[in-house]
Image (spheres, grey):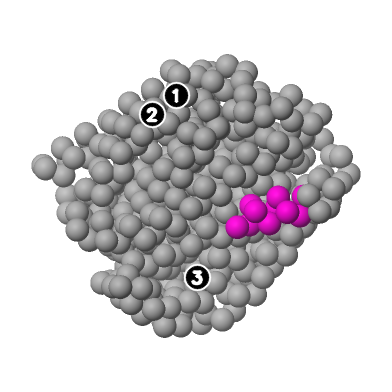
């Protein structure tokens, strides 16, 4: 099969393989850490979680480090990306271990959130750096396939990490602290794995003298404006349209995730443990959808083009999302989790490819950081909208229909932009 042959060719690229190891370990640790946080915040038996509480937690964890995103991009275009992976994952290992200590000590919620915020803030540097570094280890002709394999493999690693988290939590008598410590060990392994990459291999191309922190902060606004101007220039307009479409699809994903959390917590289960198992099954099926997207997207994007493939993904969601979601039954929702994973990851692979191929390497770090900020703001905004619309048990037909409308807007707008 051509896809299998291409995958073998990618796997033979030593530096691509080593960068993939860093991604797998890093995002696997993310999956472990995120499940530990979800279990601690949403599924603790002593807490009566509401959609507003979930939205507040997402806002506390995501919005503040969205402010870090632009600064991460400016610094990523100055610092060696390999060093970011080395020291960033090492720092996350230490911070995650601190989170476990706070859990065991019964620290106040605000202190717990500060610790979790620090871990996720460093995450911006690592994930943006992984995306920006990918074109440095594969040739341009295989960039679509690399985008299908690498980010999707990372997402699958996060799913596997979530499964490990569930297993450790069962073995360790529902100890969320033990799960967080597992995440810290994986962060440490990711840091060590980055040592197999040459320090200068991953760029960036230009190597200015490292600026003082004050000078870097002062120059951030100017450089971000330059990056946005670079992105919206006429010959790069396709990248801007793709980013806008993916931001709206991220909004849809966030709204449906909050809905699923509340349904698993209350409407579909009789206990917190049963609800957590249902959530784990949904995340596993979503991971299977990510894998299916990695197999289908290179062929589909090759036949249709990446932009048309995004249109197909969003148009498919318009039909299937309400059909599977409105019954609010377990079986259709599990199928919807798989479909949502396939659609979201398929569109993301295409968007990453369009952006990577359409912008210059010297701007790539900043643009991917802006990409992350848009993702986080859309996600938190979706959680806020869901909090306003969801009843206590999570059953909201209005929210399901609203999400279908947003998907339809993406499909129509991007199709018209493509014709223009």
Q: Residue at x 68, y 39 (%)?
A: 276
Position of residue 77 relative to residue 328, above or below, is below
- Whether residue 185 sits left or right of residue 245 in the image: it is right
Dividing the picture into quarters, in which one does residue 357 lie? bottom left
**Residue at mark 3:** 20
Whether residue 88 is visible, yes or no, is no
Q: Which residues are magenta?
A: 160-169
Position of residue 88 relative to residue 8, above or below, is above
Q: Residue at x 22, y 40 (%)?
A: 414
Alpha carbon distance from label 3 to label 1: 38 Å
Q: Residue furthest right?
A: 105
**Residue at mark 2:** 323
Q: Residue at x 37, y 45 (%)?
A: 343
- Whether residue 154 sits left or right of residue 246 in the image: it is right
Alpha carbon distance from label 1 to label 2: 6 Å
**Residue at mark 1:** 326
């Amino acid at each position: 099969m051509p896809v299998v042959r291409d995958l073998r060719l990618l796997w033979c690229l030593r530096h691509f393989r080593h960068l993939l190891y860093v991604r797998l370990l890093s995002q696997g640790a993310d999956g472990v850490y995120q499940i530990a946080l979800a279990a601690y915040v949403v599924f603790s038996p002593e807490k009566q979680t509401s959609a507003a509480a979930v939205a507040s937690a997402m806002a506390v964890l995501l919005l503040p480090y969205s402010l870090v995103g632009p600064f991460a991009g400016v610094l990523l275009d100055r610092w060696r990306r390999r060093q970011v992976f080395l020291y960033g994952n090492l720092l996350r290992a230490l911070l995650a271990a601190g989170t476990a200590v706070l859990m065991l000590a019964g620290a106040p919620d605000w202190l717990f959130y500060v610790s979790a915020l620090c871990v996720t803030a460093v995450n911006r540097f690592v994930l943006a750096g992984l995306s920006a570094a990918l074109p440095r280890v594969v040739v341009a002709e295989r960039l679509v396939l690399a985008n299908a394999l690498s980010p999707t493999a990372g997402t699958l690693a996060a799913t596997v990490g979530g499964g490990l988290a569930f297993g450790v939590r069962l073995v360790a008598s529902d100890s969320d602290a033990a799960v967080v410590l597992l995440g810290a060990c994986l962060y440490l392994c990711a840091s060590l794995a980055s040592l197999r990459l040459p320090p200068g291999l991953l760029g960036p191309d230009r190597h200015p003298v490292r600026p003082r922190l004050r000078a870097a902060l002062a120059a951030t606004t100017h450089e971000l404006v330059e990056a946005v101007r670079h992105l919206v220039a006429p010959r790069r307009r396709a990248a801007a349209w793709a980013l806008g479409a993916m931001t709206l699809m991220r909004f849809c994903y966030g709204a449906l995730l909050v809905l699923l959390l509340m349904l698993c917590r209350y409407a579909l289960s009789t206990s917190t443990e049963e609800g957590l198992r249902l959530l784990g099954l949904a995340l596993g099926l979503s991971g299977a959808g990510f894998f299916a997207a990695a197999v289908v997207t290179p062929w589909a994007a090759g036949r249709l083009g990446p932009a048309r493939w995004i249109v197909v993904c969003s148009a498919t969601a318009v039909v299937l999302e309400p059909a599977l979601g409105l019954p609010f039954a377990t079986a259709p929702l599990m199928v919807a989790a798989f479909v949502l994973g396939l659609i979201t990851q398929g569109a993301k692979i295409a968007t990453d490819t369009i952006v990577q191929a359409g912008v210059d390497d010297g701007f790539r770090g900043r643009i991917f950081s802006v990409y992350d900020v848009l993702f986080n703001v859309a996600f938190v905004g979706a959680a806020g909208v869901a909090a306003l619309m969801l009843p206590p048990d999570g059953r909201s037909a209005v929210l399901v229909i609203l999400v279908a409308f947003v998907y339809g807007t993406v499909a129509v707008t991007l199709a018209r932009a493509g014709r223009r």
